[in-house]
Image: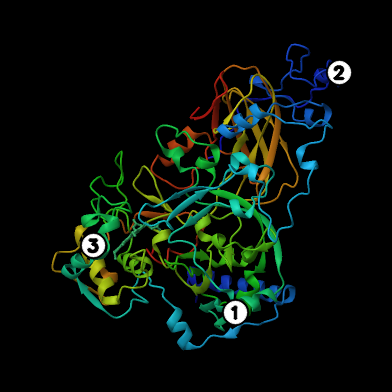
Amino acid sequence: MFTPKQCFIFMLSMFSAVVHAELEQEIQGPKLGKPASEEVIKAWDSSIFPDGKGLPVGKGTVAEGKVLFKAQCAICHGPAGVGGTAEELSGGEQGLTGEYPDKTIGTYWLYATTLFDFIKRGMPLMAPGSLSNDQTYALTAYLLHINEILPADAIMSNENLFQVEMPNREGMIWIYPALKEEPNPVSGN
Amino acid sequence: MTKKSTETTAPKNRSTTNKTVGVNDINNNDLSSTEILPVAGGGILDRRLFLKRSLIFTTATLITESSVEAAAEGISPTNSGQSPSMLKPGNTFSNYGLPSPYESQTIRWVSANAMADGNGVSWCPLHELEGIITPNGLHYERHHNGVPDIDPANHQLLIHGLVERPLTFSIDDLKRYPMESRICFVECGGNSNAGWNKRPVQAAAGHIHGLVSCSEWTGVPLSILLHEAGIRPNASWLIAEAADGVAMNISIPVEKAMDDAILALYQNGERIRPENGYPLRLLLPGWEGVTNVKWLRRLQLTDQPVMSRNETAKYTELMPSGKSRQFTFEMEAKSLITSPCAGQEMHGAGYYQITGLAWSGKGKITKVEVSADGGKTWADSELQEPVLSKSFTRFRIPWKWDGSLAVIKSRATDETGYVQPERDVLVKERGRHGYFHYNAIVSWEIAAEGYVSYVYA
């Protein structure tokens, strides 16, 4: 027998099969897409998920991150992540419910994987894509440390980054889809 | 969070009033000569007067020094009565036309990061524009790390993940697909966010509310390509990624992608401008700007959102409870009076045309009410055709300003029945620290001296 959830998923896939079939009749493209090879997909696929899927192999320490941050990031983000022209990266003392809430990595971010991903994609802004995986793990470790999430001797890697418990992990309510029948695939509720 | 209209809406039938006024009696701004009865407080007149009467409107104009100088110089007719431009050949043709040099004030207002000049926004000068289409060079911008230089010959779109057939498409390939055009707005989730401040900021209307623009976008319905790739039944999200200097990425529900998403190649008839995503932009009608990924290079079908920085740390709205709203994709109904508005100046008591823009990410605008007495009474404005779903709609209503302090505001209703909220209602529900999705009613205060300022009223 099916559980209600399985039933729902089954019905959903039946439904989408029907929709797809109708579409096929309605709009037929010229089908010019070229098959993408495994290598191309592997080279292009940079997505990193909260469960750690997609994290590249590598590791780095808080101490290494501190040195890198001073050299490459402090100019915009300020020493130790506060007081620069760009976003504050630490110092979230006010929490989220006060008169002047602080939305920082420590108080607001949901997943440590997001931090690695964002630094790897775009930082430092004048040389995006220039950081190695090890450097990115080190910077992530350092930022998590100055946000009081990791101890000073922490080492971050593809094996443990996704296990870091972020304080605001349960802090968000999905507005879309409004009538969600399935549990939130990420938070499970 | 809709607000019931408890205020008196003025009666629509003004036939008795019309009878008392001769057609030509009111074609001047002399208020004492005749009496057109208002349909709402503060001197709001029947919207149908536009058609029936030859009202001459005074217009609020931009506060600039150059316009004052020009007015002082005046026109200089020659002896024969011809203007100087008639006495010599004009300029030659141009390969690509530019606005008149006399319109040099109609520009975007750039606000970039001091250390990284490709990070920030530029505001669309809504207070300078008419109609519903934003000229391409004035469409608002939000870039995270500048405008990338992309040669379309080297650009590819990859569709992969939970699909039967991972595929790549060149721009030339995409140009051979069936296309569709759609006029719709794109609005940054952070537009109007100064409204969350305790005190209203003072700037021209477009510099407060101009992170929104409206264009005719043309491209390939995304559903055709997703169908070609063959979506697996367990695919519920689509991660879109840009080819810019932050590889901007964001998760989008597959439902939306299959519904009305377009892979846009053209904007207002020409290829999309670099700052708006050249050569390829994901267009999601009615959804917040950040999901309309520019410089699109990759679409990955998944069974979960990727939880990127721009859907967690940013573009989420902190509420008073300490919890935040996430995946608030739809832009809720909003309207804005663009004349008279902050940044403009009145020229004495008289007849004015109140005009502005309304839009909703949920569908068509069905009604825009205007008040000239700070919201005590409201009257329906004229909605100018075309009134399109998820597009700017232009509204107009005539107004007789008596020259005393007045607060004018507009209130939009969309086809779902949603009514644009007053600021206090919005703030009560969401607090002041949501940062994004501010869509409260905008109030302009008109001082007796003619200055227009942004107020919370």
Q: Residues within 10 Å of mark 3 (few under 14, many from 20)?
A: many
User: Which circle, 3 or 2, is nearer the viewer?
Assistant: 2
Judged left or right of residue B352, residue B139 is left
Residue ID for mark 1 = B169
For label 2, the SS is loop
- Front-most of residues B33 and B43: B33
For label 3, the SS is helix
Query: Residue A130 appears at what percent x and percent y?
Result: 33, 73
Judged left or right of residue B96, residue B307 is left
- Front-most of residues B372 and B209: B209
- Residue type, numbered disc 2: Gly
Q: How far apart are labels 3 and 1 at the CA level?
A: 40 Å
- Front-most of residues B352 and A126: A126
Residue ID for mark 2 = B22
Residue ID for mark 3 = A144
Q: Residues within 10 Å of mark 2 (few under 14, many from 20)?
A: few
Judged left or right of residue B143, residue A49 is left
